[in-house]
Each structure stands twice: as C-alpha cells, then as structure tokens.
C-alpha cells in the first residue's frame, strides 16, 4: 500500500519542482529575455552590453564553414575556462564577455552561443598547474602564453597535446630594457649586470637583443629574479646595470633612477613578443565547435575594443583588481590587438613578415643554443588553425591584413642606434651585384632583424677596405648598401624603412695592413634606429 505524503513532503516536492522550472528558465535564457522586456535599461552588475561598444556590426551566425573541424563529442555544458594575467592584451575577450565571469548578456553567449570564464592567474606555475588539470577538474581549458615561451615549454606539455589557436595581442611597449647612463647601445651591455626573470619573455627579449647586437648570453652577468617586477625593483635600487621588465614597472624604475633610460622596448621591437592562446588537445578534440565559437567571439570583441578604446579602458579598470582608469589606458597603449585578418596573416605567414612560424623557430633556436631545450619541434606540430579558419564565417568579406607601419622618410643619420649588427656580405671585386650566396646571408641574418624591429628604421651602412681611391670606395660602398636595401624591399619591406649610407674606408674595425683585417672592413652594418 502506497504511503501518503506528509504536509512537509508535499511542500518540499513543490519547492523542488519550482527550482527545476526556474533553472530551466535560466538555462535557456527565458529569464534574461523577460528581464530585457520588463526592465530594458537594467544590466547585471559587473557586466557590459555589446551596445556599449557601438559602431560594430553584429556577428553573423548563419552560413557554414568550409574548414573541416575534428569530429567532436558534442557541445560543452559548462563555461570555457581561460587562464589570463593582469595585462591589457585580453581586452578583446573581456569586452566580448562583459567582464571575467560567465555572462548570458555577453557577446560570447548571445552571438556565439558559448559561455566563457576568464580566470586571472598571474602566478606562472599556478597557471600551468591549472592547464595540466584541465577545465573539467577545476583547472582551465585554454592558457595564455607567448610564442617565445611556448617554444620553450612545449616539450614539457607535449603529453597534453597543446595547440596554439589564437593570437590575442602584440606587445607594443609592454616590455622594455632599462639601462644606466653608461649604456648607449646593446654592445655596451658587455660585462654588465643584467636582471630579468629567467625563461620568460623578458629573458627572451634580452637574449634576442644580445644576439642581434653581436653579443652572446655569456657576455653579460645575469641576475635572475623571481618576477619581472622584482627585476625592475633591483634595477631601481641600483644593484644592476640593466634590467628587462614590463610596463609600468620598468618605466617607473627608469624614471626614478638618476640618469637611467629605456634603451629599447617592444615599441621598436614591435614583432618580437606575440601573445597567444594555447588550448588543451582533449578540449579541442571533444568540443571543436565551442573552440571555433570562442575564437570568433574573441575576435569580435577585438573589433569592439579597437572601436571604443575609452569604454574598453573603463571595463579593464572595473575588471582588474588594483587597476585605475589611467593605468588601464596605459595598458591598452602598450599592446596591439590583432583582428581576424591579422590573425590569419600571423598564422599563415601570408603578407606577414613576422609570423608564428618565424618567431617560433627563432625562439626555439635561441633557447636551444643556451641549453634550455634539447628536443626540437616543427612549428606546425604546435598549432591548429582549423578553428581560426572556420571562424571566417563570422567575418564575411574580411580584407587581407594591411602593413601596419608607414615610413615617410629615412631616419636622421644623427640618431643613435639601439644596436648594430655586422654582417659580411660579399660582392665580386668592384661590383655592387648580389650573388646567391649574399642573398642567402641576408635571408638568414637580416630579414628577421628588420621584421622584428618592425616599427624602427634600419640604417644600412656599406664599408670597404682602403685599397683604391677613397672616392671610388665611398661610391661603391653606397651602391652595395643600396643593393642590399633593394633586396630587402623585394622581401616585402617598404623602401623608406631603410637609410642607405656609404662609408667607404672611413670606419674600419681592423687594421688594413693584413688580408684578414681588410676582409673584416669589407662589411655591411645594420643599425636599428628608433623613430
């Protein structure tokens, strides 16, 4: 015989039923739509509507992608969990999400059908622990990285089958080298104490500058710190001669130490530090549709952020702990948020002189030379562009990325260079024609330098020995420098990026009384000149 429910039991049954109905209304957005009708001007606390970022065409959600995505196991039934740090480069996703927390009124959810949770994990090791755990176990599905750092850590993460899926920013002033008054160029760092956080983008910036400036990692006294902030503080206290750190700490340190200055930053080395998102292999294999929608929503947020920098700065200040409005504006000024077309160019290499492949290979080579890694991976093993390619349906008619920097005139020849790279470019006697060997030298030793310092001028100075008349040698050295410039233009650079100089025999670096000395003097110098 069935037992009858007590009054308390009937009450609990009603409560459970109402709860299930309420959850269903929330889960499928009915409550949000009712709220929008009854109180159209009211927004959830801490969220921002896409209507606050006017002037951007809503994302297209129809049509089909021509790019084959992996066969997944359905749609994700929770928010995509993404590890970020306190950095302005995440503006696109923060705008698309209306903040950090999952938000049903966000562009991510309303236009792309995904929930996103952005988790600020400034501690590097904790962010990697979260990535290893995975989103299903309280960790993250996607983590922040930079191409240079990813080249260093890929081998250790290989069991997770990680893939780079999106570039979210370029550092454009966010990383810098602060030096004392005695240091005028990279070559002056020889024998000096240089502070930075080891195996970070700061370390890579230092290594790249040393390598291009004719030094090695053994030519400086490294002072490794636990963080980039500590490196700036060590420099400010006068305990080292130079430091590589990030904004705003590195600029504050240079300003507050008497006689100090910024030698170089990613404003000049504009294509050096590329920030990327790396996804776990199991996440993109099981939920390819969610990965595509995440990429599309983030890039729509980039368009919104770029169209409304003031509102974006206000949202960053509201979202990040301890960041005021002026700090947020400065954060945005230190980054470049690449849109869909620029992402396509970055990963495909089409029309992009500095791209994922070139940066990954350069970084991997540097880390390997100093003994940080031994195993080498091809760039294609570390990236998956299918989600970016498939997201093209959200950006119909997107034009190819345009050159970012315009050079109206060569730099002043009185401007001091950041660094000088000496290259032996051999020409036939009395000739200014480049042979195939000379072109190969330029391809391997100069193109990357010119591309990495994308916003800077490059002074090309031809030099000769003292054999023959001075006037003839000056004319010949200039003709050779001009031939080098023309070759670089054929690679896609603007002609006005290059300032051509013919020194002839006037700037020898060795004695001209031996064959070996004269050979050293027959050289081409490449000087990086800031704007």
Image (cartoon, helix red, strand yellow):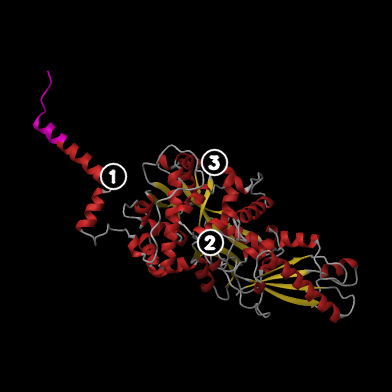
Q: Is residue 60 above or below residue 451?
A: above
**What is the distance, in whole Å, between disc 1 and disc 3 at their CAs?**
32 Å
Query: Of tags 2 and 1, which is closer to the observer?
Result: 1
**What is the distance, in whole Å, between disc 2 and disc 3 at their CAs?**
25 Å
In this image, 425 relative to 337: left or right? right
Question: Quick one: which residue is furthest to the left in this view?
Answer: 7
Q: Quadrant of the N terminus?
A: top left
| N-terminal label among 2 and 3 | 3
Q: Tell me if mark 1 has few (under 14), some (14-19) or many (20+) residues whose alpha carbon lies within 10 angstroms of its own.
A: few
- For residue 170, which numbered disc appears in the image? 2
Query: Label 1 belongs to which residue?
Result: 27
| N-terminal label among 1 and 3 | 1
Which residue does the image show at 42% across and 54% down from the upper left? 297
Query: Of tags 1 and 3, which is closer to the observer?
Result: 1
User: Where does the image place residue 99, in percent across and percent down from the top left?
Assistant: 36, 57
Query: Label 3 belongs to which residue?
Result: 161
User: Where does the image place residue 364, in percent across and percent down from the top left?
Assistant: 64, 51
What is the count of numbered marks? 3
Q: Quadrant of the C terminus?
A: bottom right
In depth, the one of 453 and 217 nearer the eye is: 453
User: Where does the image place residue 449, in percent across and percent down from the top left?
Assistant: 67, 64
Q: Tell me if mark 2 has few (under 14), some (14-19) or many (20+) residues whose alpha carbon lies within 10 angstroms of its own.
A: many
In depth, the one of 144 and 509 nearer the eye is: 144
């Amino acid at each position: 015989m069935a037992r009858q429910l007590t009054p308390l039991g009937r009450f609990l049954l009603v409560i459970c039923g109402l709860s299930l109905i309420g959850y269903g209304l929330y889960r499928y957005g009915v409550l949000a739509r009712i709220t929008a009708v009854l109180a159209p001007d009211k927004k959830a606390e801490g969220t921002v509507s896409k209507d606050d970022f006017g002037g951007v065409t809503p994302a297209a959600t129809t049509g089909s992608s021509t790019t084959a995505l992996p066969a997944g196991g359905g749609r994700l039934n929770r928010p995509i969990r993404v590890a970020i740090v306190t950095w302005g480069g995440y503006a696109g996703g923060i705008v698309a999400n209306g903040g950090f927390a999952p938000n049903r009124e966000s562009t991510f959810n309303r236009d792309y059908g995904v929930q996103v949770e952005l988790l600020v994990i400034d501690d590097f090791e904790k962010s990697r622990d979260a990535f290893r755990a995975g989103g299903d176990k309280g960790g993250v599905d996607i983590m922040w990285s930079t191409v240079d750092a990813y080249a260093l850590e890929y081998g250790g993460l290989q069991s997770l089958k990680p893939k780079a899926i999106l570039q979210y920013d370029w550092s454009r002033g966010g990383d810098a080298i602060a030096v004392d008054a005695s240091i005028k160029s990279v070559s002056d760092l020889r024998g000096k104490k240089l502070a930075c956080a080891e195996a970070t983008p700061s370390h890579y910036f230092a290594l790249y500058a040393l390598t291009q400036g004719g030094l090695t990692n053994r030519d400086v006294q490294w002072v490794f710190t636990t963080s980039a902030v500590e490196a700036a503080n060590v420099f400010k206290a006068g305990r080292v001669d130079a430091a590589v750190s990030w904004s705003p700490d590195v600029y504050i340190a240079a300003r507050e130490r008497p006689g100090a200055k910024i030698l170089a930053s990613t404003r000049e080395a504009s294509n050096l530090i590329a920030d990327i998102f790396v996804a776990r292999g199991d996440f993109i294999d099981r939920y390819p549709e969610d990965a595509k929608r995440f990429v599309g929503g983030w890039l729509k947020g980039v368009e919104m952020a770029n169209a409304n920098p003031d509102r974006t700065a206000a949202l960053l200040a509201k979202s990040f702990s301890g960041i005021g409005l002026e700090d947020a504006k400065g954060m945005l000024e230190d980054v470049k948020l690449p849109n869909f077309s620029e992402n396509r160019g970055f990963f495909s290499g089409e029309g992009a002189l500095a791209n994922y492949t070139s940066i990954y290979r350069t970084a991997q080579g540097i880390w390997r030379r100093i003994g940080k890694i031994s195993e080498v991976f091809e760039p294609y093993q570390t990236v998956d562009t299918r989600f970016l390619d498939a997201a093209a349906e959200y950006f119909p008619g997107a034009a190819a990325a345009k050159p970012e920097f315009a050079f109206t005139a060569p730099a002043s020849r009185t401007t001091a260079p950041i660094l000088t790279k000496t290259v032996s470019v051999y020409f036939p006697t009395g000739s200014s024609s480049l042979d195939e060997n000379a072109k190969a030298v330029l391809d391997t030793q100069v193109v990357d330098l010119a591309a990495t310092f994308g916003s800077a001028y490059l002074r090309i100075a031809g030099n000769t020995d003292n054999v023959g008349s001075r006037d003839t040698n000056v004319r010949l050295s200039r003709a050779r420098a001009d031939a080098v410039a023309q070759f670089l233009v054929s690679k896609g650079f603007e002609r006005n990026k290059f300032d051509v100089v013919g020194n002839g025999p006037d700037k020898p670096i060795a004695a001209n009384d031996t064959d070996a000395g004269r050979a050293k003097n027959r050289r081409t110098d490449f000087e990086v000149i800031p704007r």
